[in-house]
Image (cartoon, rainbow, N blue to C red):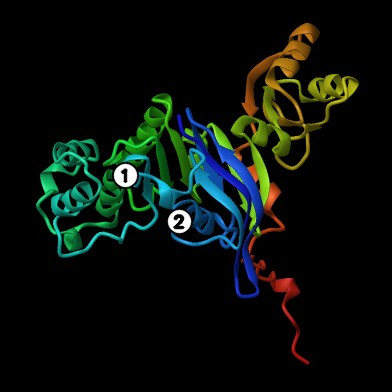
Amino acid sequence: MTSIDVKDLTKEYGTARAVDHLTFSVKPGRVTGFLGPNGAGKSTTMRLVLGLDRPTHGTATVGGRAYATLDGPLRKVGALLDAQAAHGSRTARDHLRVLAVGNRIPDRRVDEVLAETGLSSVARRRVRTYSLGMRQRLGIAAALLGDPEVVMLDEPSNGLDPEGIVWIRELLRRLAQEGRTVLVSSHLMNETASFADHLVVLGGGRLLADTPMREFIDARARPRVRVRTTDGTGLRRLLAEHGYEAAAPDDGQDSHEGHWTVEHARVDDIGRLTSAAGLTVLELGADEGTLEQAYLDLTASATEFTTTPAPTPDQQPQEA
């Protein structure tokens, strides 16, 4: 199957460098999440892959070829970059039929993707009457029209209702299982965690990470274990003997049947220790690191916009 290969890719706009010597590959058979703060260079990179911009330096290829040189490109690469791209006065069916004719795609395929994206019942309505979520579905239908080997989607969950979010999640997984190359840009960390197998993370136009998602999380987000016991003092003593520190519940005082937190620990390890010691445990649960925690840890210094907490009343400046 076909991969996306970015090699030493650089894009400058005047004196601003949007993409800075970027190198990574998007492989078939998995969903690759494309993450980064605003201004990180994600959209610019996708545009360079699709030949919508010319690189200042380096290459971006699909299956070893520049997008502009592909025969019947819609049958090779399907992309959604802007849900507002469809002409508002056209119906959804007409929009897709124009794309099909221009790429020598059978007309029957229009009805297939309309059904696949749930738009069959509104296919003859003009696009300007569509909600944002419906426009997103139409953009995805256009991306799938050529039954492409490569699918690139920018914020596909934007505007979708809960049912639509579940649908796009299942669609992405199916496309990867079929051996296609799937690249998805998103700002929704929890949603990305639900479908991505691999992550490419940018910051300031540079590559920050190119790794399997689970490895990315485990390397940057601290695992914790929650323990509820009737013997907080015994739990703290036991864990201290084995190099762990238990954070006390509430205000730091031992409490009857309190919930304790053990940092940098795994459930299996804590479970074995408490069981061997005969300590009564009422509840034992993992508080695994999340993609959001790992992402924020990595990109903290690469965000374009940051906020400053409002001062508390005692920090307010005093009048002279």
Where does the N terminus fall, quadrant-wise?
A: top left
**Residue drawn 62% across and 51% down?**
202
Where does the C terminus fall, quadrant-wise?
A: bottom right
Q: Which residue is mark 1?
A: 72
Report helix, strand or loop for mark 2: loop
Name the amino acid type tagged 1. Gly
Report helix, strand or loop for mark 1: loop
* Residue 154 in view of the camera: no
Foreground of the two, 52 or 252:
52
Image label count? 2
Foreground of the two, 26 or 204:
26
Foreground of the two, 292 or 303:
303
Residue 95 in which image quadrant: bottom left
Q: Which residue is mark 2?
A: 51
Distance Cα–Cα, label 1 vs label 2? 14 Å
Label 2 Cα crowd, 10 Å radius (few <14 / some 14-19 / many 20+): some
Tell me: 76 left or right of 126: right
Q: Position of residue 50 (x, y in %)?
A: 44, 52
Q: Position of residue 143 (x, y in %)?
A: 32, 45
Label 1 Cα crowd, 10 Å radius (few <14 / some 14-19 / many 20+): some
**Residue drawn 45% across and 37% down?**
182
Foreground of the two, 259 or 181:
181
Tell me: 87 left or right of 206: left
Name the amino acid type tagged 2. Gly
Of badges 1 and 2, nearer the viewer stands 1
